[in-house]
Amino acid sequence: MLTRIDHIGIACFDLDTTVEFYRATYGFEVFHSEVNEEQGVREAMLKINETSDGGASYLQLLEPTREDSAVGKWLAKNGEGVHHIAFGTADVDTDAGDIRDKGVRVLYDEPRRGSMGSRITFLHPKDCHGVLTELVTSAAVESPEH
Amino acid sequence: MLTRIDHIGIACFDLDTTVEFYRATYGFEVFHSEVNEEQGVREAMLKINETSDGGASYLQLLEPTREDSAVGKWLAKNGEGVHHIAFGTADVDTDAGDIRDKGVRVLYDEPRRGSMGSRITFLHPKDCHGVLTELVTSAAVESPEH
């Protein structure tokens, strides 16, 4: 069951400049940053609020590490902006399976590694009214037996 | 001070079909719906979680009521997808003023009426790394003396 807006993924050309924009304009600070080579992104997570399911909502700022990454290609086509939205769940495997059974294309056969040790998958935007949609199970919040 | 992700605004061609997609796929239910003639939209708010500032995070599904509305023009150009993101604050007037003083263009001279009696304004996406950004003070959550 999806229980929170986990994050909004925002693609940018220069991560440092964009982080500074969010800090200077709104006071949002970097909670975590990492490079995800598999996804081809350098990213910063800005924690905005905590959520009623025990998790939190973030902005995820994404700079591609290579032009042929998914985010790199998206940026070249669309310019900077909202790249995807993500819902948090305690059990990404079950939810992804249930959603696949409803006829929505799930992009990975098995969830992959996301920010902060989470497990993630994506739903095809053409099956979701134009919205690239991520499902996330956080390593920090949800217990491993799920 | 911006204290939550208030909502993600998603533009769609047909509100009923899109509401049904979110219900059937994820189990999200309509919390509130209304027509905002000033904004030129028919909308449905799906409440996803409550937030640590006493508010909540929603998906806001938006169907234009006329082609020449902002959302109607955006849809004709971009197709369905994420139209804007919104941050919640107890005091949209002060925050909008502070952000304007930092050189970011605020689209309204004074906040206007948003969903569920809220007061809203927008920041120019070209000043926000491509993200149309809304600031919201909820009528339900924040006290009137703010």
Image: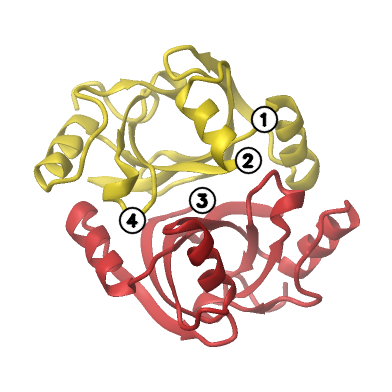
Chain colours: A red, B yellow
Q: Which residue is mark 4?
A: B129
Question: In the rendered structure, the residue with mark 1 lies on which chain?
Answer: B
Query: Of label 2 and label 1, which has the lower sequence position?
Result: 1
- Residue that appears at 68% across and 27% down: B15
Q: Is residue B123 visible?
A: yes
Report if the CB atoms under discs 2 and 1 are less than 8 Å apart: yes
Question: In the rendered structure, the residue with mark 3 lies on which chain?
Answer: A
Name the amino acid type tagged 3.
Ser
Q: Which residue is mark 2?
A: B80
Left or right of residue A86: residue B113: left
Say which of marks 2 and 3 sits in front: 2
SS of the residue at dot 3?
loop
Query: Of label 2 and label 4, which has the lower sequence position?
Result: 2
Q: Is residue B60 visible?
A: no
Q: Which mark is residue B13?
A: 1
Mark 2–mark 4 Cα distance, whole angstroms, equals 20 Å
When asked about the image quadrant of residue B142, the answer is top left
- Residue that appears at 73% across and 58% down: A124
